[in-house]
Image: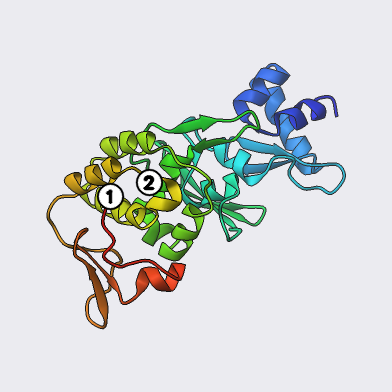
């Protein structure tokens, strides 16, 4: 138990961190194998370990800390970032990790960890609790960009409307790095509907409009056929009464 307290302080740690603590590779490898066998620690994946509580045998590091250790560029993102900040309505057993370094999806202690390639590199917070996470403005834009693959539109809007305040200058900065017409278009539409709630400026929406191009697009894939609505200003087609059904109000043709 010589190094157990140190491992508990580290929470989730790499093999290299164990080597730095123990002194050499062979001694660290033998110690880790012994501690795994005795259930003092658990192997998360190759080269990554987590200390286990002596009280209940559960990892002392939560899923967000573990996700943050999966690579040097790992950051909790998308719906998982909303959950970390306390703005998600649904607790998930999947953690989305933005990482430049590739890793295969895996499961540990009932939680699935999925990698997504980062679309931009700015907007990362390194927090004192050991969690690396996209900041709230980047989380919003990442989620708008990928909502169909990550959470669905209804959960996206519920998460966004749980946020007390947003920095629109940051969002414009990240939008510029994204440089995607469709993301400007979707972001402009969403925040035109939430303009009063967040105090979004007319200039923000005008920038989104200018950068969104002239193409008409589908807000949600697979909405061709059946009853649809078309927002004339934002040139977006969506299922009939889509926004109203999610939020209970709002004008489909809201503009600045």
x, y percent for residue 82: 53, 49
In the displayed structure, would residue 112 be above or below residue 232? above
Q: Is residue 221 left or right of residue 233?
A: right
The label on residue 141 is 2
Q: Would residue 45 be seen by someone viewing this image from the given angle?
A: no
Q: Secondary structure at mark 1?
A: helix
Q: Is residue 185 left or right of residue 197?
A: left
> What residue is drawn where x is 26% and y is 57%?
255
Q: Label 2: how many residues lie within 10 Å, few (<14), some (14-19) or many (20+)?
A: many
In the image as oriented, which residue stretches furthest toward the bottom?
226
- Is residue 4 or residue 233 the one in the foreground? 233
Marks 1/2 in contact by CB < 8 Å: the verdict is yes
The label on residue 207 is none
Closer to the chain start, of discs 1 and 2, is 2
x, y percent for residue 100: 39, 36
Residue corresponding to mark 1: 183
Colour scheme used in the picture? rainbow
Quarter of the image for residue 149 reads bottom left
């Amino acid at each position: 138990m010589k190094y157990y307290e140190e491992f508990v302080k580290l929470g989730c740690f790499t093999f290299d961190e164990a080597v730095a603590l123990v002194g050499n590779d062979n001694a660290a490898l033998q110690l880790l194998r012994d501690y795994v066998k005795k259930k003092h620690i658990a192997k998360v994946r190759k080269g990554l370990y987590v200390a286990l509580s002596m009280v209940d045998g559960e990892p002392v590091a939560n899923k967000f800390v573990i996700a943050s250790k999966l690579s040097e560029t790992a950051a909790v993102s998308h719906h998982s970032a909303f959950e970390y900040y306390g703005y998600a309505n649904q607790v998930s057993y999947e953690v989305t990790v933005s990482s430049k370094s590739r890793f295969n999806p895996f499961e540990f202690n009932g939680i699935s960890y999925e990698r997504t390639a980062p679309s931009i590199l700015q907007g990362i917070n390194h927090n004192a609790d050991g969690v690396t996470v996209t900041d709230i403005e980047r989380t919003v834009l990442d989620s708008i960009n990928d909502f169909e693959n990550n959470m669905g539109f209804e959960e996206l809007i519920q998460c966004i409307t749980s946020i007390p305040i947003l920095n629109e200058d940051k969002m414009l900065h990240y939008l510029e790095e994204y440089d995607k017409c469709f993301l400007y278009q979707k972001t402009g539409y969403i925040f035109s509907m939430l303009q009063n709630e967040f105090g979004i400026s007319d200039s923000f929406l005008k920038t989104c409009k200018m950068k969104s191009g002239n193409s008409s697009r589908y807000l949600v894939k697979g909405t061709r056929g059946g009853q649809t609505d078309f927002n004339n200003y934002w040139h977006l087609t969506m299922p009939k009464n889509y926004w109203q059904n999610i939020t209970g109000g709002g004008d489909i043709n809201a503009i600045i």
